[in-house]
Image (cartoon, rainbow, N blue to C red):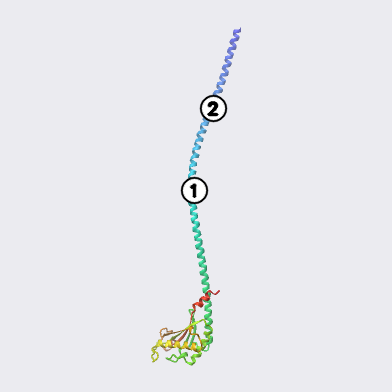
Amino acid sequence: MKTTTFLTAAVCSLSLLSCVSTKKFHSMESDYKKSQADANNCQDMLLKAQALSNDLAKDKNVLQAQIDYLKKNSTQVLSALQDMSVLSGKQAESVKQSLQTLSEKDSYIRNLQSAIARKDSLNMALVMNLKGAVGDINDKDINIKVEKGVVYVDISDKLLFNSGKYAVTENARKILGKVAKVLEAYPDLEFMVEGHTDNVPISTGCLEDNWDLSVKRSTSVIRILENQYHISPERMTAAGHGKFLPVASNDNAEGRALNRRTRIVILPQLDQFFKLLVKK
């Protein structure tokens, strides 16, 4: 009885031991498989991390190359910009100087136009005064005009001289007196007295030709203006053109009469003109 009971207990113990060992085994086996899976997962993660690290390294190299390129090119761009800045500065200064020059030229032109207008006004005033002084003389015998800014007084030789002579007649002295009175009112003006003849030859004991006659007539008029009307000789110039500057044809009597004349030319005074130019 005791023996049977012992055997039964032993068998139960072995069965119980067998059951416990099997459960532990399955538990350990399950843990192993889980560990193996975790290991595999870790390996995959390690491989992915390694690949990511490699990609990052490549990206780093690419970025570094781009940074180096940008640094290099930014230096070149900066240098170019500096050059452009210098160039723009020079261009701006050049434009500024050009504008200033244009402004100065425009101002000069406006002053010049104003001075010409004032000079023309003075010439017209002179002409009007001369015409007023000799207003009772026929316009065919004395002609007062302005051409190209110069005042001319043309006096027919029949008012001043006898034919072929250079001595001023008594009646002519009155005409010269009227002209002299106007010229005295403009003491800064200088003038030239020109003698002109036709082409009819002349030769006398004291005259060689028409050229000689024209010069002597010019000096005769100047001596009257100086000695009788006290015009300063420094203001006067004598000239003779003879037959060489006709204003009409010498083929007829009317043309030859026009060519025989004494011309008083009011000389343009450049210094006076420039005074007008700078006058504000």
Spatial CA distance of label 2 from label 1 is 52 Å
Mark 2 neighbour density, 10 Å: few (under 14) some (14–19) many (20 or more): few
Give the residue displayed 49% in from the left and 44% down from the top.
64
| Image location (x, y in percent) of residue 255 | 43, 87
Amino acid beneath label 2: Ser
Q: Quadrant of residue 19?
A: top right
For label 2, the SS is helix
Q: Of 141 and 71, which appears nearest the observer?
A: 71
Pick the quarter of the image with the N terminus. top right
For label 1, the SS is helix
The residue at which mark 2 appears reads as: 35
| Image location (x, y in percent) of residue 101 | 50, 67
Is residue 46 visible in this depiction of the protein?
A: yes
N-terminal label among 2 and 1 = 2
Amino acid beneath label 1: Lys
The residue at which mark 1 appears reads as: 71
Q: Relative to 264, does residue 77 appear above or below in the rendering?
A: above
Is residue 257 visible in this depiction of the protein?
A: no
Q: Relative to 68, does residue 42 appear above or below in the rendering?
A: above
Contact (CB < 8 A) between labels 2 and 1? no
Give the residue displayed 50% in from the left and 55% down from the top.
82
| Image location (x, y in percent) of residue 97 | 51, 64
Pick the quarter of the image with the C terminus. bottom right
